[in-house]
Amino acid sequence: MIQQYFDFTNDLIFRWVMEREENCLAILRAILPELKITAVKRRENEHPVNYLAFDDERGVRFDAIIEDDQERFYDMEMQVANQLGLGKRVRYYQSQIDQETLKTSEHYDALRESYVIFFCAFDPCGQDRRLYQFHYYEDEDRQLRLATNSHVILINALGTKGKITPELAAIIDVMNRRRDNPNPLAVSLVKEIDGYNQDKKRRRALMNLETRLYDERKLGLEQGVKIGIDQGLTQGREEGLTQGRQEGHAEGLAQGRNEGRVEAIQAALAFFKSQGQAPTEVVANLSQMFHLSRQTAQNYYDQLAR
């Protein structure tokens, strides 16, 4: 049986890689060669952003700020899901850096230069560029930039445009599971990630996290499906009653219920496919969740999975 491989985009793998200061330094140099960073240190964060408890680990959280030799600060995060609100998420992490690096009673003039860097497994801006960088600009005069000393960088693993360093290209290849890049940074990262996959204790932590995330997604889906069915039935009853007065009460209710059920099945099907499940596994899950015969579930799959 082929074991699941956890790559650089996995939350825990990314965190373990970034726990090593030499990795932080190499990756920052790859993204920002113009800063000529010569050394970094990790500054532990006392205020966790998000906990997800599992065996032998503190959880996935914003647990360190990186400081370079020029007293600039960096937060690097991995973002796999293309969810709404990425800008607000970036803003939140920027505020966390400011809170953690500004000492008690210090004036805001003491705020250090900071970078929030997101590695995205998707194109966050839809421009096919490999790197996006954002600052505060005046709306009418785009040459006028507000000196906030804060920077936002989004790395697009799917991008093909824009000039980047060979080292950043190597990191993007590692994100995309390309193992043939001879760049020393890519070779080093792949070797380290392979080691984490082979380490029994770390692999157990990876599997525990994956199981918990799957259970939470499944529970959320089941709750969403139930809500969807209830809403579909309610809407179906309302529409059915209206239509029933015109064309027949019973026929209208049946149609409304059927439409709500089909929408719920379609949502569940889309979720199971997004998890990489094989068609036979999707059909089996639909059959179990909606109490369908295997043939009926297969018919829904054939009709809705196009």
Image (tube, rainbow, N blue to C red):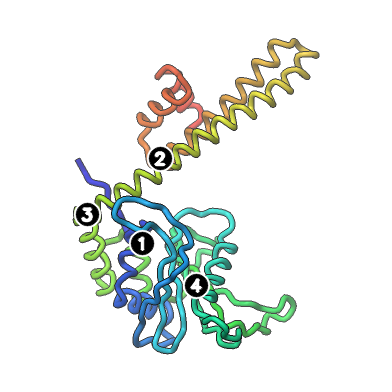
Local packing at callout 1 (Cα closer than 10 Å; few below 14, some 14-19, many 20+) is many
Q: Where is residue 288 drawn, in percent x and y?
A: 41, 24
Measured in 3D between alpha carbons, the distance from the residue under mark 1 to the one under mark 4, in whole angstroms, is 18 Å
> Given contact means CB atoms under 8 Å apart, are the residues at marks 1 and 4 in contact?
no
Question: In the rendered image, which residue does mark 2 sit on?
Answer: 215
Answer with mark 3 or mark 1, whichever residue precedes in sequence: 1
Instruction: Locate residue 204 relative to residue 154 in the image: left or right.
Output: left
> Given contact means CB atoms under 8 Å apart, are the residues at marks 3 and 1 in contact?
no
Identify which amino acid the numbered label 3 is placed on: Lys
State the residue at coordinates (70%, 16%): 252
Q: Is residue 306 visible?
A: no
Point out the image quarter for the N terminus: top left
Question: In the rendered image, which residue does mark 3 sit on?
Answer: 201
Measured in 3D between alpha carbons, the distance from the residue under mark 2 to the one under mark 1, in whole angstroms, is 25 Å
Question: In the rendered image, which residue does mark 1 sit on?
Answer: 175
State the residue at coordinates (59%, 58%): 85
